[in-house]
Image (spheres, coloured by chain):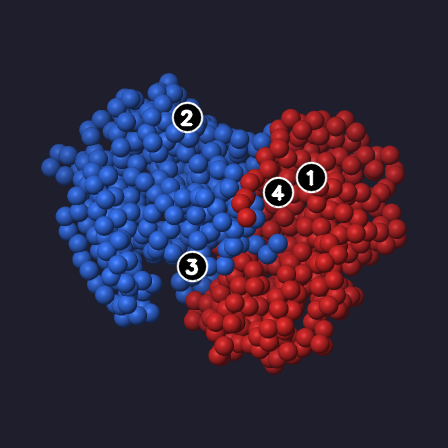
């Protein structure tokens, strides 16, 4: 039963989102740079390599523990550029504001964006503001685009994972998604969780300083769709198999508890300040230490490795010594009945 | 409430010992059914199937609330959503279930007011805040969820919230076990009984069933070690030919169950015949709202006409639910029926057997 309308699932970051990109967008805008489907576009211009990325931000609620839609919008695009191996430089900001949004709220959001940009070391150099009638947008939507420069020695791409690579995850998973969820109306349990929204470009810089540029093969921030979906995309594009270990994946107790309650798998929940790195085995320790030396990376761990078996697939070795496949998320996870 | 996850129940060493024990005692081929969908997911996620000896087969049973909801009931929910002035409130996993012609998700995309809630009391709150609207909650689930839904109906009655009603499509577990045993082609040697349901109804609720069929039954919790413990007990009973009704979830399940929850269930609901997808009508296996609370019974308040509910052609959800087929034996599995474009409800719900196979089972 195919849908003739857009469903929320089309925005989940899982398989249904992918089919929308592949079936509707790629054929129309057909070109090699887009077809690579990295976090941002990577291209050469006048002898230098650039990364260019865009992302739109909608979140409910717009203010949440650990941040608001403003720093999410700055950090998100900064991170997309950093995942291309680029040094993020300039950003654009487009605001779509619903009539009636309080001026104080807007001011808070803009000030947060200013602070986030300074913290990331990027400059907002162009922007746009639109106001739409009440009811035609949900308070505020933000689009940011960004451009960054890729050092010559850096070559990261989602099709560049190699057999033997160690897979490093920079910290606990699903913090952002569970924080947002617990803030929504109707969820009565309280947690001390905070969104992990943070710029990762400083961490990436440290990683490349400590490892030869060509030892880091893939960088990816597991946002929508989570770690499970990101690993599947990499396995598919690099035509390699991935093996991860359940007991190595950093997960906060509170997040694990909330997931059990709601029937969610944290592997598919969004992160806004975490990265996955595929690193040549002889440099993995050095890169792990570089990540751990960053304030956002102290819980980093090696969670698995690239194998030559089962290309395109991701397997998990479970705590009890079992093994199972980790598939890509299909659509948005919905809380279960019991 | 703060949340802390209990890792000790996943402890690798305890698991390893249980697995060793199971391997050492298991001789004959046995087919064990986990009745509950949450067990199915836990079994897949923890990789239990991959560590059991080949002599033990695990079958998934009719314990996913969304999956056993009859096609006509799903169509009725969709019809309700189409009534003007109705705000339909539901648990999330019903959103994608395909009815004969539409789904709640598609009705929502088409502009109908359908809201996912986490508790029935949130639906009641929506009713209080929207006095001009009629707020209907979709009461789907087993003995686990029914008490909180009953409590919401009682609150609505006491506070006279006139615009709140529930459509009750609840199902009861013990009558379903009876129906499974009565079905001629079902071969089950033992049951892993649901944990949450048993917290409410207590171990004794299964006694009449056990006395009649003398089949090994063990209540299990949801952590991998809980499930391995239950499997080990069942295998021991089968090997020694000494069937029993036992409890491997003593930290939560008592003999009598939760008296308060049972009391409120009896106050609001009375048992009624119910139609289960794949099984058909099982006598006294559902819950209908008592006449006393008719003012909050959506079935009485709205004239819902469901024209010819049709189960999708070729869909084997029915056989999958009673364990006579496993998902890869369905002609539609992974071909016409995927989580992105599900044909049957077992592919939709996170607790559905087909969705669990699709997500966690490699061919």
- Residue at the far left in the pictured view: A46
Q: Relative to residue A273, is residue B39 drawn left or right?
A: right
Point 26% across, 46% down: residue? A74
Q: Chain of mark 4?
A: B
Q: Which shade of the palette goes to chain A?
A: blue
The answer to whether mark 4 and mark 1 are in CB contact below 8 A is yes
Residue located beneath label 1 in the image: B227
Q: Position of residue A200 (x, y in %)?
A: 30, 36
Give me the chain that's red: B
Q: In this figure, which residue is indicated by the disc labeled 2? A: A166
Residue assigned mark 3: A8
Q: Which residue sits at x=75%, y=65%?
A: B266
Specify whether disc 4 shares its chain with disc 1: yes
How far apart in space, not on screen, are marks 3 and 4 (Cα)? 27 Å
The residue positioned 62% from the left and 42% from the top of the image is: B42
Q: Chain of mark 1?
A: B
Mark 2, secondary structure of its residue: strand
Q: Can I make out residue A337 in this image?
A: yes
C-beta proximity under 8 Å, tags 3 and 1? no
């Amino acid at each position: 039963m195919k849908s003739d309308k857009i469903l929320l699932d089309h925005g989940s970051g899982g398989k249904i989102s992918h089919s929308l990109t592949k079936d509707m967008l790629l054929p129309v805008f057909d070109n090699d740079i887009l077809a690579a489907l990295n976090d941002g576009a990577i291209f050469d211009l006048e002898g230098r390599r650039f990364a260019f990325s865009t992302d739109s931000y909608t979140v409910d609620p717009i203010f949440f523990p650990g941040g608001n839609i403003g720093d999410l919008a700055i950090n998100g695009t900064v991170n997309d550029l950093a995942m291309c191996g680029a040094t993020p430089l300039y950003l654009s900001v487009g605001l779509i504001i619903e009539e009636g949004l309080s001026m104080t709220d807007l001011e808070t959001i803009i000030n947060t964006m200013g602070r986030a940009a300074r913290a990331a070391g990027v400059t907002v150099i162009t922007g746009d503001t639109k106001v739409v009638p009440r009811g035609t947008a949900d308070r505020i939507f933000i689009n940011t685009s960004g451009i960054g420069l890729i050092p010559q020695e850096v070559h990261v791409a989602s099709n560049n994972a190699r057999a033997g690579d160690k897979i490093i995850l920079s910290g606990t998973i699903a913090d952002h998604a569970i924080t947002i969820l617990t803030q929504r109306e109707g969820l009565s349990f309280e947690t001390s969780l905070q969104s992990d929204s943070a710029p990762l470009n400083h961490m990436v810089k440290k990683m490349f300083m400590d490892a030869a540029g060509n030892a880091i093969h893939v960088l990816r921030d597991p946002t929508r769709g989570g770690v499970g979906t990101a690993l599947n995309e990499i396995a598919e594009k690099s035509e390699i198999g991935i093996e991860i270990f359940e007991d190595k994946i950093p997960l906060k107790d509170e997040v694990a508890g909330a997931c059990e309650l709601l029937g969610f798998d944290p592997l598919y929940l969004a992160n806004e300040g975490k990265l996955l790195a595929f690193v040549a085995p002889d440099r993995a320790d050095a890169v792990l230490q570089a990540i751990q030396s960053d304030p956002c990376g102290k819980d980093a761990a090696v969670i698995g490795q690239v194998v030559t078996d089962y290309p395109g697939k991701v397997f998990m070795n479970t705590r009890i010594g079992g093994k199972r496949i980790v598939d890509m998320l299909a659509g948005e996870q919905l809380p279960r009945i019991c | 409430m703060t949340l802390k996850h209990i890792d000790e129940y996943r402890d690798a060493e305890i698991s390893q010992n249980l697995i060793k024990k199971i391997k050492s005692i298991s001789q004959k081929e046995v087919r064990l059914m986990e009745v509950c969908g949450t067990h199915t997911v836990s079994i897949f996620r923890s990789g239990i199937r991959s560590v059991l000896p080949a002599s033990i087969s695990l079958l998934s049973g009719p314990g996913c609330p969304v999956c056993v909801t009859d096609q006509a009931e799903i169509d009725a929910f969709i019809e309700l959503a189409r009534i003007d002035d109705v705000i339909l409130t539901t648990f999330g996993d019903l959103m994608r279930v395909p009815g004969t012609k539409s789904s709640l998700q598609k009705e929502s995309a088409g502009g109908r007011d359908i809201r996912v809630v986490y508790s029935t009391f949130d639906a009641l709150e929506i009713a209080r805040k929207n006095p001009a609207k009629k707020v209907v909650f979709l009461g789907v689930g087993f003995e686990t969820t029914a008490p909180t839904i009953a409590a919401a109906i009682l609150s609505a009655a006491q506070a006279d919230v006139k615009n709140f009603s529930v459509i009750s499509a609840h199902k009861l577990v013990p009558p379903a076990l009876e129906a499974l045993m009565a079905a001629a082609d079902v071969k089950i040697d033992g049951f892993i009984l649901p944990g949450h349901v048993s917290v409410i109804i207590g171990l004794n609720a299964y006694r009449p069933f056990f006395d009649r069929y003398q089949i090994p039954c063990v209540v299990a919790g949801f952590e991998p070690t809980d499930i391995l413990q239950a499997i080990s007990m069942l295998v021991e009973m089968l090997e020694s030919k000494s069937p029993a009704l036992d409890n491997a979830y003593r930290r939560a399940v008592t003999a009598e169950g939760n008296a308060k929850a049972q009391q409120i269930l009896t106050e609001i609901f009375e048992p009624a015949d119910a139609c289960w997808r794949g099984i058909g009508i099982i006598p006294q296996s559902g819950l209908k709202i008592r006449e006393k609370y008719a003012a909050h019974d959506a079935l009485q308040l709205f004239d819902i006409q469901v024209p010819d509910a049709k189960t999708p052609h070729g869909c084997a959800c029915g056989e999958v639910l009673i364990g006579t087929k496993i998902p890869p034996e369905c002609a539609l599995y992974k071909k016409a029926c995927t989580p992105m474009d599900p044909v049957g409800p077992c592919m939709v719900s996170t607790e559905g057997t087909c969705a669990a196979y699709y997500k966690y089972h490699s061919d």
